[in-house]
Amino acid sequence: MKRFIPFLKSDPLVAVIRLSGVISTGGRGALNDQALGPMIEKAFKRGKPKVVALVINSPGGSPVQSSLIGARIRRLSDEKGIPVIAFVEDVAASGGYWLASAADEIYADESSIIGSIGVISMGFGFDDMIARHGVERRVYTAGKSKSMLDPFQPEKPADIKRLKGMLEHIHATFKAQVMKRRAGKLDEAKDLFTGEIWVGKPAIDVGLIDGIGHLVPVMQQRYGDKVRFARYGAKRSVLQLFGARVVADALDGIEERAHYARFGL
């Protein structure tokens, strides 16, 4: 009750934001700026926290949503003068590491997977299959570049070149983000932007994280044993709680598992 009594000093408060799942514009438990925005704003503004802690467990996903979420965290941190510390659980890879890089410091477990600073585009080609079944694909466009990488037509060298150009541009943006946020900490003798991953202490050696540590003990060490935690996480809708999206959730779950499987999780 003492935090409600005027002039009586309150125990330090840590606002904990949980960022767990694939970064995407939609889907079951997806991380995106629209869904997370109100929660992040509340974490920075409610109760005058000493620090905002990000608990991250994400294999990545949308580079745009990663950028939007990270930019919101940085804006609020600068406006409120509140530092941000990230704590990685199983994985902070690709877009997950982008989120971690929004923090002033990054801690992880000895077995956490870190990095994968790269960009990937995946898909399937069905042109041979439909040809074997006598199916003819018909596509009409106004604008020669309107149709690109149609999975039902053979790949075109021009389309591949255009896609790789886009991936390189996104990769350059990702690299700039990491170099800015981790300035003076990265191992400049090593190429950290090949998509490679590091586990635990080796991630410290190359400067991608600042140390091995978990949320509660690190915060208690800094702010004392009486430190308080206010936890914020994405809320599920009423329909999700009562199982009204069973089929959609199952499909989203398959996609999410595919993202985590890239890192053996």
Image: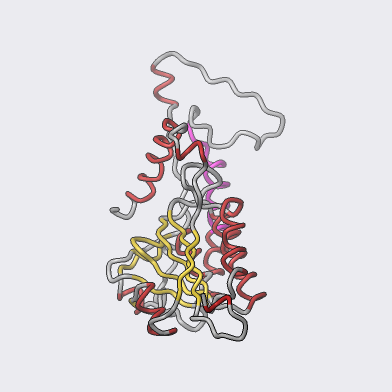
| Front residue of this view, candidates 182 and 99 | 99
Give the left or right position of residue 69, taking residue 127 as reference: right
Residue 246 position by quadrant = top left
Residue 83 position by quadrant = bottom right
On the image, the x and y values in percent for residue 62 come to 52, 51
On the image, the x and y values in percent for residue 191 come to 42, 71
On the image, the x and y values in percent for residue 243 come to 43, 34
Reply yes or no: does residue 158 show up in magenta. yes
Task: Work out which residue is located at the far right of the displayed protein and give it.
Answer: 142
Vertical placement of 61 versus 80: above or below?
A: above
| Front residue of this view, candidates 21 and 215 | 215
Vertical placement of 132 versus 203: above or below?
A: above
Vertical placement of 107 versus 161: above or below?
A: below
Residue at 46%, 61% in the rendered image? 18
> Start and end of the magenta stretch?
154-170
On the image, the x and y values in percent for residue 218 come to 38, 79
| Front residue of this view, candidates 135 and 259 | 259
